[in-house]
Amino acid sequence: MAAQHSPMEQFEIKPIIPLHIGGLDISFTNSALYMVIAIALVTYVMVYSVRGRPLIPGRLQSIAEIIYEFVGEMLESVCGKEGRRYFPFIFTLFMFILACNLLGMLPYSFTVTSHIIITVTMALVVFVGVTAIGFARHGVKFLSIFAPAGVPLWIMPLLVPIEIFSYFVRPVSLSLRLFANMMAGHTMLKVIAGFVIALGAWVGWAPLAFVVVLTGFEIVVAVLQAYIFAILSCVYLNDALHVGH
Amino acid sequence: MHVISIGIWGRSAIAGAIGGLTVAALPALAEGASGGMPQFNPSGFAPQLFWLVITFVTLYFVMARVALPRIAEVLELRAERISDDLDKAAALKAEADQVIAVYEKALAEARAQAANVGRETAASHAAAAATRQAQLGTELGAKIKAAEARIAAARATAMASLTSVAGVAAQAATKRLIGVDIEAAEAERAAATALRERG
């Protein structure tokens, strides 16, 4: 019974349909279920709402258009016109994280993005992809991002290792930020919610009120973290597109 | 960017604080949990990765092939339609301006024509009046002359009869005063002479 009340219990991966290919476990778990719900939700909003291609948008279509233009403007303001090619990827990344974060806010649901393996994979895809784009576009010249122009030569031995280090820390900070925010927020909600019962009818309303406020705060965090992940991906992409800025 | 970076760092600080709280709360509330956080249990990695790739790639293709082109199309169509409508409105406005210009030109012409007609009419009226006045003047002059002639004639007649009356009066006076009966013709001659002498 004690395990049932653990604030970490909500992060448990539970197989729904056990599947194995060779020695590989590819079971359809609660995590997989919420990923499928997330992409179904995003597809519903982004595809179903625009099905008739009407000129005067309905409510859902307005939402789809606003998100489209919001992400498009974000990408263009950071990366310029060259970034347009990567719009589908940045858009998918943003929508996937946003949907997973927001679905996690539903009571009894599972938060896909509260698992470091998920955030680290997405961050590594961005990191490796951006590095590949950088080398593909600029060749060896891409390495010049480690040696900023206009810096005195004697400072280079100090600066270049720092730049290299900060470059390789990018996927770590990118993935940890999302993972830690999601996990900490949900853990805290669970812990405080546990106090409601523990403290009883006389004092329990105080943590209850706090949970209400915190839930609102966590919804903001869910949106904000998706935005931060997406815009930092754009910033890294911009470094690869425009070396020497 | 500045606001965002505040957001990131502010959030990190809060996350740190929450992390501390979580760690403190864990031992009390998580007794019996099967060895630490589920996030670091490697047995969950493979299924999560597998389904992440499947769902993410699916979503990517749905977005890239269907959703985004469709929304772009709608937005483009709308922008086109709006610019079309604006163009049409501009064309209509130009047309209206032209019509107004034509109308105003016609109005000015009509006004000028009306002024012309008025001037001409006034001139012709003035000429007619002058002619009539001149005619009237001549007529009146003729009448005056005729009247003067009549008066002169009447005067002459009167003067002539005055001579004869004076002659008769002189004959009668002569007969009464001196008892001499003079000839009527002589009396008349004498009267005429006397009248001529007096002017």
Image: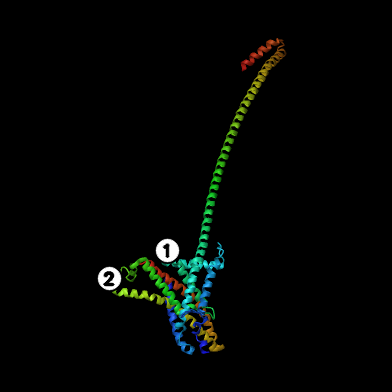
Disc 2: host chain = A
- Above or below, comparing residue A53 to residue B101 in the picture: below
- Above or below, comparing residue B30 to residue B128 in the picture: below
Query: Which residue ends up furthest to the front in the rendered image?
Result: A22
Residue at (29% x, 72% y) in the render: A156
Q: Secondary structure at mark 2?
A: helix
Judge by depth and name the residue closer to the eye, B116 or B67.
Answer: B67
- Above or below, comparing residue B112 to residue B174 in the picture: below
Comes first in the chain, label 2 or label 1 = 1
Give the class, few, some or many, for how many residues have Cα within 10 Å of label 1's Cα (few <14, many ≥20).
Answer: few
Q: Is residue A244 visible?
A: no
- Above or below, comparing residue B90 to residue B62 in the picture: above
Image mark for residue A81: 1
Say which amino acid is labelled 2. Answer: Leu
Judge by depth and name the residue closer to the eye, A189 or A169.
Answer: A169
Say which amino acid is labelled 1. Answer: Lys
Give the class, few, some or many, for how many residues have Cα within 10 Å of label 2's Cα (few <14, many ≥20).
Answer: few
Image quarter hosting the N terminus of chain B? bottom left
Name the spot of residue A217 as percent of width and height, x first.
50, 78
Name the spot of residue B10 as percent of width and height, x first.
43, 77
Q: Secondary structure at mark 1?
A: helix
Label 2 to label 1: alpha-carbon separation: 33 Å
Name the spot of residue A244 as percent of width and height, x first.
34, 67
Name the spot of residue A82 as percent of width and height, x first.
41, 64
* Residue topped by disc 2: A153
Residue at (37% x, 75% y) in the render: A168
Which label lies toward us, 2 or 1? 1
From the viewer's perspective, tell me whether residue A219 is left or right of residue A242: right
Toward which corner of the image does residue A233 lie, by quadrant? bottom left
